[in-house]
Amino acid sequence: MALILNIDTSTETAGIALSEDGKSLLLLQNNEQRDHASWLHTAVGKMMAETGHRLRDLHAVAVTSGPGSYTGLRVGMSAAKGFCYALGIPLITESTLKVMELAAREQAPGTDLFCPMIDARRMEVFTAVYRSDGVELMSPVAMIIDENSFSEYLNLHSMSFFGGGSYKCKPLLAATSAAFIEIKYDAGYLGILSFLRYLHREFTDTVYSEPAYTKEFYTHKGK
């Protein structure tokens, strides 16, 4: 049995799921992006109390490593690393886009390729491309979308676009092979992927792990 705490604070909606062998026991969500940091630890305590488990019962902690909100990624990663340090258990990281892709495969089968998109401001998105069997064809990247984007795929395959960044791309990607779909994903899907990584002992070094920002992180210097 593998009891894993799954944390996703990478986008507007934060979520945690306690999963046992990949099956969610309880899922909690927060829709206020500015409150992710203050919400997270309280939510974990509530989750453990409601399920009757203790933190020391955990076998691993999983977190979405990005891409996504810079602040949100740091919130999730620092919390996950803290739990792993304190409890002496392994850390598992997973791409936010991979979690989204798994949800799409389950909710909208019947397409050749899946393309999750996270809004990265202006006409830029964080995106990747996956086959219908989950194999990654294009690694996560920050991309400025234009009318020629993904033409090498759209000329040969049906392709589903989804996620918060897909709406602004719809007017530009006019190929008949492009479909824009609605999917819902949560930390429960992270629980499925984290269990597979746990079985294969695909752990991340707790000391050196950091968010996968995908593009350079800028901060504003004070005057």
Image: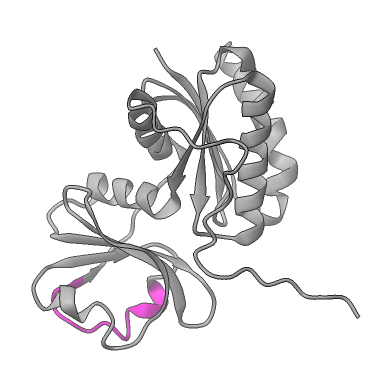
Q: Main secondary structure of the magenta part?
A: loop
Q: Position of residue 213 (x, y in %)?
A: 54, 61
> Quick check: 165 above or below 66?
below
In the rendered image, the vertical position of residue 45 relative to residue 13, given as above or below: above
* Left or right, 158 with reference to 81: left
Q: How many marks?
A: 0
- Confirm whether the magenta stretch covers residue 55: no
Where is 104 relative to 196, above or below?
below
116 or 205: nearer the eye? Answer: 205
Q: Is residue 61 left or right of residue 131?
A: right
The residue most toward the left is 156
Where's residue 56, x and y in %? 62, 13
Query: Which quarter of the figure has residue 176?
Result: bottom left
Image quarter of the C terminus: bottom right
> Which of the 4 image quarters holds residue 196?
top left
Say whether residue 168 is magenta: yes
Q: Name the outermost residue toward the bottom.
A: 147
Taking the image as drawn, is residue 144 in sight?
Answer: yes
Say which of 191 and 202 sits in front: 202
Residue plotted at (49% across, 69% down) = 119
Tell me which corner region of the image, top left, top right, bottom left or bottom right, holds residue 78: top right
**Residue 37 screen position, x and y as percent:** 72, 46
Apparent side of residue 160 relative to residue 207 in the rendered image (left or right): left
Residue 118: horizontal and vertical position, in percent?
45, 65
Q: Quadrant of the N terminus?
A: top left
Residue at x 63%, y 35% (from the top left corner):
81
Can see residue 184?
no
Question: What residue is rendered at 66% in x and 27% in y?
Answer: 85
Q: Which residues are magenta?
A: 167-178
